[in-house]
Amino acid sequence: MPRLHHLLTLAFAGALLQAPLLQAEELPAAIRKIEAKGAKIVGTFDAPNGLRGYAAQYQSRGMTLYLTPDGQHVLLGNLYNADGKDLSLEPLKKLVYDPMSKEIWAKMQASSWIADGSKDAPRTVYLFSDPNCPYCNMFWEQARPWVNAGKVQLRHIMVGIIREDSPGKSAALLAAKEPEKALADHEKAGKGSPLKPLKEIPPAIQAKLDANQQLMDELELSATPAIFYLDDQGDLQQQQGAPSPDKLVKILGPK
């Protein structure tokens, strides 16, 4: 199955009325067998030809189950109609990925980030950032026209994964008297940055780094920058690495 951050970039169309969540005791026995294997049943939806659809979450992935009319068999996977339309996309979006996206956005809001840009900017973009990451610096440079114009606020969720001194450098930024200025000075300097890693990281700062790393692990991310933003439809999207010019406009909006 694709990872969550890949699935979130899929283009979903339309909307589906959400069915009420089912209690475990209300589930048919065949569906309960699937649930026992680790799948979380989050809702039901109508399906053609007597099938009953169930939307499920397995770890950070969504999947659809289809119960046959006799209640004795379960089909797992995507269902297509005669026109080639995938009937599983809308249920997964409505019942799995929309709620999951809201949860991810809320977790990023609650993480330890350093602001870059006006707090009144109409658009917010989160990115997992390592002080030694050249592509993080590239994205910082790319975003200057939007940030300087007050259109976007970048929120750098600091982690330390690239080099041995990355955690200490992230800690130095988070512990600075003026983290926003410290980050700006570091990014402006590029390879010539004078930022020194903390030799001893205070427990409170270490806890912030640990929580940021845990969130990164939960999202199955392994590299920086990992950029998260809301598209024009309000759907959560993700970009790995410094974006191309056409992607840049999608992330940051029109200049």
Image: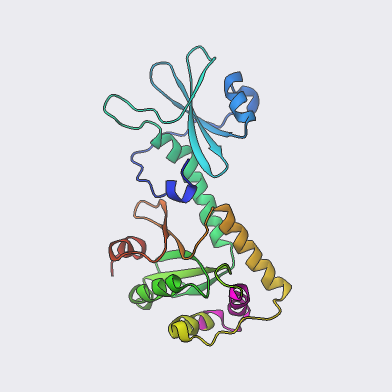
Please state if 131 lies on the left or on the right of 250 as rendered. Answer: right
Q: How many marks?
A: 0
From the top left corner, tell me how far across and down residue 201 is, in percent. 69, 76
> Percent position (x, y) of residue 77?
45, 30
Residue 120 in view here: no
Residue ID at (61%, 23%): 26
Is most of the magenta stretch helix, strand or loop?
helix
For the residue pair 117 and 37, the one nearer the viewer reads as: 37
- Stretch of the chain drawn in magenta: 165-181
Which of the colour schemes (rainbow, by chain, secondary structure, one colour) is used? Answer: rainbow
Is residue 43 depicted above or below 152 in this figure? above
Q: Quadrant of residue 161?
A: bottom right
What residue do we see at 38% from left, 20% from top? Answer: 48
Q: Is residue 47 found inside the magenta-colored segment of the image?
A: no
Look at the image and tell me whether residue 242 can be seen.
yes
Q: Determine which quarter of the picture holds residue 170.
A: bottom right
Quarter of the image for the C terminus: give it.
Answer: bottom left
Image position, residue 226 (x, y; %) = 47, 62
Q: Nearer the viewer, residue 234 or 83?
A: 83
